[in-house]
Amino acid sequence: MSEKQGKLLDGKGAVITGATSGIGYATAYLFAVNGAKVIATGRNEDRGRELISRVKEAGGEAYFIKADLTKPDDLDLLVETAVQKLGRVDILVNNAGIEILKDIDETELDEFIDLYKVNLFAPFYLMKKLIPHMRKNNGGVIINVASTAGLSPYPGGGAYCSSKAALISLSKVAALENSRYGIRVVAFAPGLVQTRMFFEGVPEDKREEYVSETAKKVPLGRIALPEDIAEILLFLASDKAWYITGSVVIADGGLITGRRESGNVPPEGKK
Ligand code: NAD
């Protein structure tokens, strides 16, 4: 499923948050070259501009709207401008997210709330505002980018894991409330993806080693690239995925299914 194989999203209007880096950037580009008119939103204007010109060079249509998702005024302006520019909103990808890795007793209330503003409150608000437009159009697709962290928590993930678990639950509720209007809502749970978030705290010259060491934990033996994840989101946003709603779609190379190696193996090998 690539741009060569036709335009899966022809005529669709799409809003994608966190589109200036990582998964969001790759998704905005792929959606646009697959026929969608894309609103890419984020805070980094340079990256936004660069994305839009890449899309234009490839013959697609995209607009950048600067917005900080923690600011209610920015959210309102984003919705207003998106509706005005797209005419209709068919697809919303709530992709922006932040992570903190701290034990609960070390986490400040303010940082917990700030994380929730991006990971949960903004997706809630954008759904609240865009669902009425989708209902008027008799259809739409909302993809909320959660994480395997929302299904399989770990120490230090008090804020992050709980926000993603809440996003999964919110997605299921939204799916149930909107199925009668032809709107699909999917919670998407990626495993490990090579983005800024994945490399946080890893020095540039140690990245390669970090990828190969971490990949050993993944049953499929690889850490995904943002472009790999964008292909899955393209499918989920397209009409080909028409029977998928209310689900958590996991793409993690088998990471949370179990360990890569057999347990309890004696030193000489076979039991
Ligand atoms: P990333 O850091 O490249 O992307 C996150 C994006 O969110 C950035 O563009 C950032 O600017 C944006 N963002 C953060 N705060 C914002 C704010 N206040 N206003 C507007 N935008 C804001 O990392 P990514 O991996 O591409 O993350 C995308 C999504 O994927 C996130 O929701 C993340 O939780 C999820 N995810 C990532 C991984 C991984 O291994 N990379 C795994 C599971 C889930």
Image (cartoon, grey):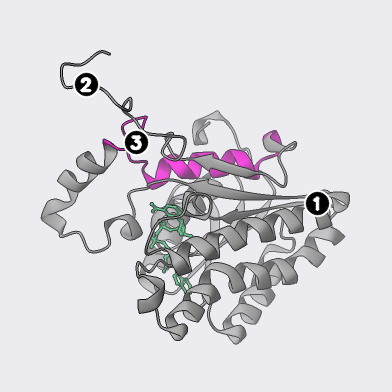
Q: Which residue is more in the foreground, 111 or 180?
A: 111
> Which residue is the site of mark 2?
266
Q: Nearer the viewer, residue 63 or 130?
A: 130
Q: Is residue 258 something one can see in this rendering? A: yes
Mark toward the viewer: 1 or 3: 3
Residue 225 highlighted magenta (yes or no): yes
Q: Quadrant of ligand 1?
A: bottom left
Task: Judge by depth and name the residue closer to the eye, 254 or 52.
Answer: 254
Instruction: Say what amino acid the circle numbered 1 marks.
Output: Gly
- x, y percent for residue 130: 73, 67
Judged from this view, the residue extending furthest toward the left is 205
Q: Is residue 63 visible?
A: no
The CA span between labels 3 and 2 is 22 Å
Q: Is residue 249 magenta?
A: no
> Callout 2, which amino acid?
Pro
| Residue placed under numbered mark 3 in the picture | 218
**Given this view, does label 1 or label 2 mark the residue nearer the observer?**
2
Picture quadrant of residue 10: top right
Identify the magenta region: 216-240
Q: Which of the two marks, 3 or 2, is nearer to us in this view? A: 2
Left or right of 208, for residue 218: right
Asked if the residue at label 1 sits under 8 Å from ligand 1, the reply is no
Q: What residue do we see at 32% from left, 49% from top?
A: 194
Quadrant assignment, res 259: top left
Q: Residue furthest top?
A: 270
- Count residues near mark 1 (Cα–Cα under 10 Å), then give few for <14, some for 14-19, many for 20+: some
Are dots 1 and 3 in contact, CB under 8 Å?
no
Q: Dividing the image into 4 quarters, which one contains the C terminus?
A: top left
Residue 202 sits in which quadrant? Answer: bottom left
Q: What kind of element bears circle 2? A: loop
Q: Secondary structure at mark 1?
A: loop
Tell me: 168 left or right of 51: right
